[in-house]
Amino acid sequence: MLASPTVSKTENLSLHAGGVELLIIQPSPFCNINCDYCYLPERDSHNRMSISVFKQAIERLIAEDLIGEQLSVVWHAGEPLALPISFYEETFAVLSSLIPEEKIAHSIQTNGISINSEWCAFIKSNRIRLGLSIDGPAFIHDAHRKTRSGKGTHAQVMKGVELLRKHGIDFHVIAVVTEQSLNFADELMQFFLDNGICQVGFNIEELEGVNQTSSLSENSIPDRIRSFFQRIYELQRVADGAIRVREFDRAYHAIAVAPIENEAGTCNNQVEPFAIISIAHDGSLSTFSPELLGMKNADYGDFSFGNVLHDRFSEIAASNKFQRVLQDIKTGVRRCAEECQYFSFCGGGAPSNKYYENGSFASTETLFCRYTIKTPIDIVLEDLESSLGIGQP
């Protein structure tokens, strides 16, 4: 059993009212390539989740009434396709035996080098939402996304893209933005357009986990990032619907919806206990930011709050460690609400970024929020104001 709570039961046991919004399964920490900006510490490990652990995880969620109207299951980190199709056939069968299939949506984020005809058939037959990691044209992608022998992976990924096209499978792309990328906004967008890639998200190179440096930490970077995203926005508009950029879609949505009216940041599932649940191969679990799973640190010991094999979520929520993290995250959200004019757009940021960049969950601005939340919102707002003639004589 976990440690007894030190605060009131009513405060401790308030699990996410709507159930888990996002269930992230990390069936193995192993990755078959070696990206130099990866945050995962154990990507050499071949440990694999057993079917019994997966079944116990789902049964635990059901028993504690944490399954809502829909369950979005994301298979993630290290490389999901490094496991055989048979593993997914078994886990999908277990899941559909416990939860009606119409309530389940599967997603996989992959580096793409293992895609073959068999995988395409499985992805298509199970209606899996697929994301590929492609940083752009080969000279950008291969600078960081390499095989374990140091060779670029771009050619292999593009073979996978061809197969997905052949099988009629839609996918979106996540591209990591490094200092090098900032010089080539036009080349990046042209690459995606040339290859019929119509949905792109840009992840900045983050300080997170074992990745303790970022090429985007230099003093000269903010202006260059602003210029980069400004150009991406312009090119997206010129493309006239041929490509959508996640950061600007989010900005438009954030501007359009009603502002957050309380400091809890209810639009932000990364600060709500158990709105996101991440489960590792051995059944250990975390919540809040998915990137916290499996991470160790001197302040908290680690960010695994329990294990689905023997811990109830209500017990986990009552534990001293969980409550300490939760209270620190709440403090950070409260500070964001008090100090940041963008709070109504994001609800308090990502706890993992706060911890790894600033050393505390109770902190505020990060590179992530500065560059991928504030900058796109500024660009969209300025464009909307210009089109409406706001601020013009």
Image (tube, rainbow, N blue to C red):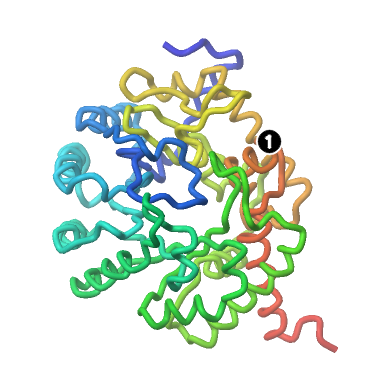
The residue located at (68%, 86%) in the rendering is 387
Q: Quadrant of residue 20?
A: top left
The residue located at (57%, 46%) in the rendering is 266
Residue 2 percent location from the top left of the image: 46, 13
Residue under label 1: 359
Front residue of 181/239: it is: 181
Front residue of 155/246: it is: 155
Amino acid at pointer 1: Gly
Front residue of 321/139: it is: 139
Left or right: residue 232 compared with residue 170: right
Query: Which quadrant would the N terminus be assigned to in this image?
Result: top left
Front residue of 274/64: it is: 274
Residue 307 percent location from the top left of the image: 37, 23
The residue located at (52%, 26%) in the rendering is 302
162 is higher (above) or lower (below) than 264: below
Left or right: residue 34 compared with residue 269: left
Residue 280 percent location from the top left of the image: 36, 33
90 is higher (above) or lower (below) than 35: above
Number of dots carrying numbers:
1
The residue located at (33%, 17%) in the rendering is 310
Q: Residues within 10 Å of mark 1 (few under 14, many from 20)?
A: few
Residue 112 percent location from the top left of the image: 31, 60
What SS does tag 1 mark?
loop
Q: Residue furthest right?
A: 393
Left or right: residue 305 compared with residue 347: left
192 is higher (above) or lower (below) than 171: below
